[in-house]
Image (cartoon, grey):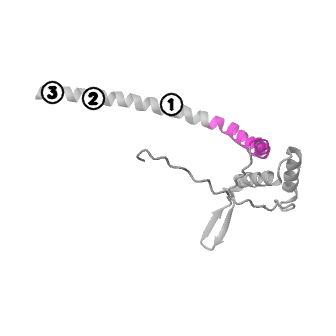
């Protein structure tokens, strides 16, 4: 910059917009009650509980159900949500409450898979030991052939 100092211009502010509130009674009864009670108990905006819950439901169903958008095209039921709130807005508290059923399910699945994982790990150790043994034999054979070749030269 040849010793010149560049002065930054003032940033262009975002427009302030008043967004509509997340509507009531848009979920089936059980989910509606959960979202409403979570909003009340955490004293957080309804949007936080609703969007986080929608993301969790998407996680639970995305590989089980598809939407057929055309005769020859289908999409999985994914929804991507983002909640932006200032620090201290209890986002983590709401997120952990919403994710409890999914985390419980993941622990249950992990527990049920442990015997299979142990079995596969054991088989893999046997295969790895056999591979090491074969590599040693191959290295010894290559060394022997190399020595024979050196003697012939």
Q: Is residue 74 left or right of residue 133?
A: right
Q: Which residues are magenta?
A: 87-116
Asked if the magenta segment contains residue 107, the reply would be: yes
Residue lying at 62% horizontally and 37% vertically, measured from the top left: 116
Residue 47 in the image: state x and y as whole percent: 79, 55
Q: Residue furthest front?
A: 4
Residue 66 in the image: state x and y as whole percent: 67, 63
Q: Residue furthest left?
A: 153
Q: Which mark is residue 141?
A: 2
Counting residues from the start of the chain, the first of labels 3 and 2 encountered is 2
Do the CB atoms of the residues marked 3 and 1 lie less than 8 Å apart? no
Crowding at mark 2 (Cα within 10 Å: few <14, some 14-19, many 20+) = few
Crowding at mark 3 (Cα within 10 Å: few <14, some 14-19, many 20+) = few
Counting residues from the start of the chain, the first of labels 3 and 1 encountered is 1
Do the CB atoms of the residues marked 2 and 1 lie less than 8 Å apart? no
Q: Say which element carries label 1.
A: helix
| Residue annotated with mark 1 | 125
| Residue annotated with mark 3 | 150
Do the CB atoms of the residues marked 3 and 2 lie less than 8 Å apart? no
Q: Say which element carries label 2.
A: helix
Residue lying at 71% horizontally and 55% vertically, measured from the top left: 58
Q: Is residue 145 left or right of residue 35?
A: left
Residue 87: quadrant of the picture: top right
């Amino acid at each position: 910059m040849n010793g010149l100092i560049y002065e930054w211009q003032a940033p262009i502010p975002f427009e302030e917009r008043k967004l509509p509130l997340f509507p009531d009674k848009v979920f089936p009864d059980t989910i509606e009650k959960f979202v409403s009670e979570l909003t009340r108990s955490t004293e957080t905006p309804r949007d936080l509980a609703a969007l986080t819950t929608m993301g969790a439901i998407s996680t639970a169903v995305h590989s089980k159900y598809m939407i057929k958008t055309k005769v020859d095209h289908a999409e999985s039921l994914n929804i991507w949500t983002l909640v932006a709130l200032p620090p201290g807005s209890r986002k983590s508290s709401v997120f952990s409450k919403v994710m409890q059923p999914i985390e419980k399910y993941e622990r249950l699945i992990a527990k049920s898979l442990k015997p299979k994982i142990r079995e596969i790990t054991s088989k893999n150790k046997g295969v790895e030991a056999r591979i090491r043994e074969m590599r040693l034999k191959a290295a010894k054979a290559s060394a022997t052939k190399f020595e024979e070749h050196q003697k012939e030269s």
